[in-house]
Image (cartoon, rainbow, N blue to C red):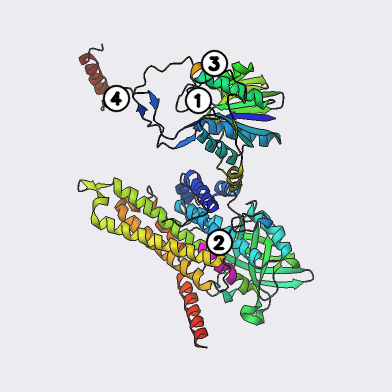
Amino acid sequence: MDYFFTEEQQMIRDTAREIAEKKIVPVRAELDEKGEFPTEIMKTCAESDLFGLYIPEEYGGFGGGIYENVIAIEELSRACIGVSVSFAGSGLGAYPILLCGSEEQKKKYLPQIASGEKLAAFGLTEANAGSDAGGVQTTARLDGNEYVLNGTKQWITNGGEAGIYTVIAITDKNKGARGASCFIVEKCTQGFSFGKKENKMGIRASATRELVFEDCRIPKENIIGKEGIGFIVAMKTLDNSRPGIAAQGVGLAAGALDAAIDYARGRIQFGKPIISIQAVQHMLANMAVQTEAARALTYAASKYIDSGAKSISKESAFCKLFATDIAMQVTTDAVQVFGGYGYMKEYPVEKMMRDAKILQIYEGTNQIQRNVIGQALIKESAKKRR
Amino acid sequence: MRLIVCIKQVPATTKVKINPETNTLIREGVESIINPFDTYALEEGVRIKERMGDGVVTVLSMGPPQVESALKESVSLGADEGILLSDRAFAGADTLATSYALSMAVKKIGDFGLIICGKQAVDGDTAQVAPELSERLDIPFVAYVRKIVEITNEKAVVERMTDHGYDVIELPLPAVITVVKDINEPRIASLKGKMRARKAAITVWTAKDVQADEELIGLSGSPTKVIKIFAPKSRGKGVSITGEPPEIVDTLYGHLKDGHII
């Protein structure tokens, strides 16, 4: 379907698609098998100016919004979401600075992220703080002109690969959710190290590691905003980054659909290509309409957020929830269209189905997305009643 | 140093049809691209500029007005400017007339250090224009360069690919070289490059602008006459012989004998 892209948006799509086809598709199976980080591809994305799409021009970016970033993420995801999450993860790490950082912080860090010179990463999750973000145990204590961080973050995308980390830590244990704050920590800071690299089911090209803080001292001015607003920063960040996860779902589903159609045209059973069998056609038709609906919702939510709308949690959750459930469904069906071949690593859909699962889990499980939507519905209804 | 990269716009497909009456390629409806070998020439030009820290990459082409898109694409890939030789008088040129027209354009451009071309165009496959251009300009020429080992304003040391390895050649500049695809991996155009290309103005020169002798350009300057163009006859399916080596030899011997080849 034609979404009437501007000339710039068309350029972004063409550039990301060229990278996907030329640089990602040829190596994705190997990166997956070896669990190898796509350093070269990240370099190509940087040289192609993709890392700064959503960052204002004054900080070295392209000056677009979430929509522009979503277009790029979708195209990269058609080829491999293990690669695209490494790309999108940098945006996730940058949003706290972009949305809530001081002018000095923006000037210092955003140009490095926009140019792709450094990747960013966001550290919220811990062993005992997943869906319940309130369970964060990492602490930050003010000592003179420095904050001292202690604790361990878990499953951090781009861990070890990123140069700039935005991290949530508790500054006041007695204040509950209002006792959390967000900090910028640079790689190579003393007391900051990385734990084991996780051995994952899917998105195996991406780096997922622990961030370990042991009396890690950072300058006082590295706090984002002020003490106590850490969870507000985190929620704002996730509201802005979730369309990117939706875009991963859309791209992944589109890639799986393309692969399934190509295979069904070439696979001969009962003396004819299986695409001529109505049962197969109906599966492909469902996959196509679901993918397109997910795309339309993701684009609409992105444009809505870019419009400057104040309340965006529901719309952001809408597209994340829908597009990632669709990605799981479509990749599963793609394996079914391939039959036994789909289960083999020689064909790409096996990896796509393994990769899809994480989309329903990270950046808020899809159950949490339903909570977010449910709470928004209650809020809206209560407002009307008043 | 100014680096001049010569490019040609060619049909994107290898399945080009031929008009049987005029013996020319049917270009309608076929997407045009930069000759793939020329993309390596352009990339090398841009890399030399980056390596030397300064310089200008000028892309030069001859063809109809639509070649402007190929020159704009070159700008998106790192070229500083594009010059198009476009004039009805240039039409129908063979390699001799083309190299003459290009040499006149190079003279108009003036000072330059190196001219880089792809080893050949995928449509004509002649590989003649670059060496002819060096003759016209009376400067050194090296074909099939796979690596530029060293380059200064005065000289270049290059590796020339051969059937059995490579030669290392030092040549004074200015000079003309053609490059093979082993030399580099062309970059993907950046967004900033594409934005720059969109705004880039391509200079168009006519035969008069480059003071070309009308007798030496276009059809009148082209001694090559195409008498007939035809697709080679299909050879039909080959025969595959399988089995143990002694069996294979026997079967092959039988085939050769039956065919009165031996």
Chain assignment, label 1: B
Q: Amino acid at mark 3?
A: Glu
Decide: marks 3, 4 in contact (CB < 8 A)?
no
Q: CA distance from mark 1 to mark 3?
A: 26 Å
Q: Is residue A241 magenta?
A: yes
Q: Is residue A111 magenta?
A: no
Q: Amino acid at mark 4?
A: Ser
Counting residues from the start of the chain, the first of labels 4 and 1 encountered is 1
The residue lying at 70 percent from left, 74 percent from top is A227
Q: Nearer the viewer, residue A148 or A183?
A: A183
Q: Residue placed at 35% from the left, 59% from the top?
A: A287
Q: Chain of mark 4?
A: B
Residue that carries the numbered disc 1 in the rendered image: B120
Residue A261 versus residue B79 in the image, above or below:
below
Q: Nearer the viewer, mark 1 or mark 3?
A: 3
- Comparing marks 2 and 3, which lies closer to the viewer? 3
The Cα–Cα distance between marks 4 and 2, rounded to whole angstroms, is: 55 Å
Look at mark 3 in the image and give the residue it sits on: B215
> What is the CA distance from the residue labelled 2 to the residue labelled 3?
59 Å
* Secondary structure at numbered mark 4: loop
Residue B148 or residue B231, whichever sits in front: B231
Q: Which residue is mark 2?
A: A66
